Amino acid sequence: MGPARPFCLWSVVLVGLLMGSLAGSVSRAAAQTTLIRGGSIFTMDPNQRWAQALVIRGNRIEMVGTEVEARKVAGPGAEVIDLQGGLCLPGFIDSHNHLAMGAITKRGVSVAGLKGKAAILAKIRSWVEQQPREGLLLGYGWMPDSFESRSPRREWLDEITGDRPMLLLSADAHDMWFNTAAMRACGLTDQTPDPEPGKQYYRRDEKGWPTGHAIEGAAMPMLVRLGAVGPEAARESQQLTLARAPSQGITSYFEAGVLMGETSDSAAPVYEQLIEDDRSGKLPVRIVGTVWTRSPDDDPKKIADRLKEWNRKYKSEHLKISVCKMWSDGTLMSRGALLLDPFCDQPHARGKMTFPSERIEAVVDAVQQAGFDMHIHTDADGSVRTVLDVLERVRQRRGGGFRHTIAHNSLVHPDDVPRYAALGVVANVTPLWGTDYNGSYRTIYTKLLGSARMEQRLFPYGDLMRSGAVVTYGADIPGVDVDEIPPLLQIEAAVTRKRPGFPKDLPLVARQRVSVEDALRAYTVNGAYQLRMENEVGSLEKGKKADLVVLGRNIFEELPESIHTIPVVFTMMDGRVTHDARP
């Protein structure tokens, strides 16, 4: 990725007495009345797409229109922010992320992008030699296809780490590689049962001993036992995510699951801390949180009851918990998601889902009866069809009006694409995955699916949007790295289907590219719709909350391959300045 160009044209003209003052290192109390003018304003309001100026009074937008009209409304005592040719947009809404703790999974040695056992172990060895001689060793970034055998072994790490425990999460945190010292510290033996055999489990040798590869939820007990996750670690990780969000233009996000333990209840201390931050004026973004389930053994009624309880208990001005997150499957790359047709390299295998369809339906039914929406992790075309079928049956039985979301949509059969709009189902995607991510996705998916199926079904973000479905974007750390969270980077990926910073890449399924306006819609008004916030945020309209971002250059006039270099100069959430990079 190229560096952001400095923006030197900004100026603030004080026309009267300022009604606010700087408060803290990243926020400034908004003036009582603020006039924004001097550039372009793209509102995302279909009735008034462009404007010259807008007026903010308190934390709400008073008017949007011409500069002459705005000056009259603002009056002589307003603070004037001169855009100096920049572009003002609604604040970005990340509709699937894990900013409250996701950076926990990005600690230690990174082996991202490395291929082959030798190269990966060489990087780990060099890093371990520089670490203190005691304590837990951590790493991340590998994928099953990083290894010739598709599954790493604990003995490989033992030669480097000796008796020190080591855990390395995969790039998307759906798998974990561990050494023998970690296995012993956690009491794992040949008699330790798998959490869910064949779905969330430990790979084993011929004698039944774990080989060093934990899949899906089998990793969590080890992470907890060795102290790799917890409220303190989550708090530290937020400096890499939540604290940076305003500088990326993010004003709201959907917390797609705070994973601190084996059940959703483990997230309570993290939400309590975020609410405390909000009440003290330190929370920089709006948050819609979740109660989550990743085991078919979870009781649907108890899930719905917990969601009702947390919706009442954990809330503040800018935080609410109102969605149930479900991991219906694992990942296509790890063959933990269901295909409609067999894998090309394993013609007798189609993968599998974590939840059977009847259990998905029981949870959806219970949550919907309680009055809440579902957000369902779904990674392959067989899984997608299963979930769509469930949502259709529940809709026929219980009626519509719900905004259930299918997340990821890595592979969708063309016959199922129009069903999203027909059923009122939101499609949430991560644009960066629709590129040759890490320089390996094209090779991996060609091996798994073949070129014809890739072209027809892989990351069909454009097809979904053109079908009339509501499509939303989210970066989804740990599925991306910390520096890949910014919406502008993701928007470039959606528009080009190339990795930002790699303009010579071949687009991955080029016909799935979308326009800049469509990509912005997914990061603004569509995100607000998914989160049931469209009456307050998502577009710049009279009466809505003053959530906005100002870019140093006009994204509509930018070369697509340089969108990620546009500087975010100014961000406002609820009328409060949360990021200010003006000189």
Image (tube, rainbow, N blue to C red):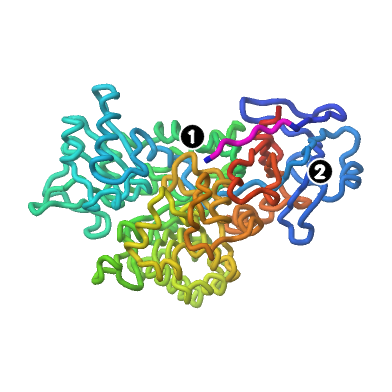
Q: Which residue is most to the front?
A: 504
Residue 300 position within the rendered picture, expressed as x and y whole percent measured from the top left: 38, 61
Q: Which residue is mark 1?
A: 240
Residue 176 position within the rendered picture, expressed as x and y whole percent measured from the top left: 28, 45
Residue 111 position within the rendered picture, expressed as x and y whole percent measured from the top left: 33, 40
Q: Earlier in the sequence, mark 2 or mark 1?
A: 2
Crowd class of label 2 (few under 14; some 14 to 19; many from 20; radius 10 Å): many
Q: Amino acid at mark 1?
A: Leu
Residue 420 visible in image = yes
Viewer-side label of 2, 1: 1
Residue 310 visible in image = no
Q: Which residues are magenta?
A: 2-8
Q: CA distance from mark 2 to mark 1?
A: 33 Å
Q: Quadrant of residue 161?
A: top left
Tell me what residue is drawn at x 40 percent, y 70 percent.
453
Q: Quadrant of residue 358?
A: bottom left
Question: Residue 55 got which mark?
Answer: 2
Task: Determine whether, in the image, residue 429 is placed left or right of residue 281.
Answer: left
Crowd class of label 1 (few under 14; some 14 to 19; many from 20; radius 10 Å): some
Q: Secondary structure at mark 2?
A: strand
Tell me if residue 58 is in the magenta stretch: no
Q: Secondary structure at mark 1?
A: helix
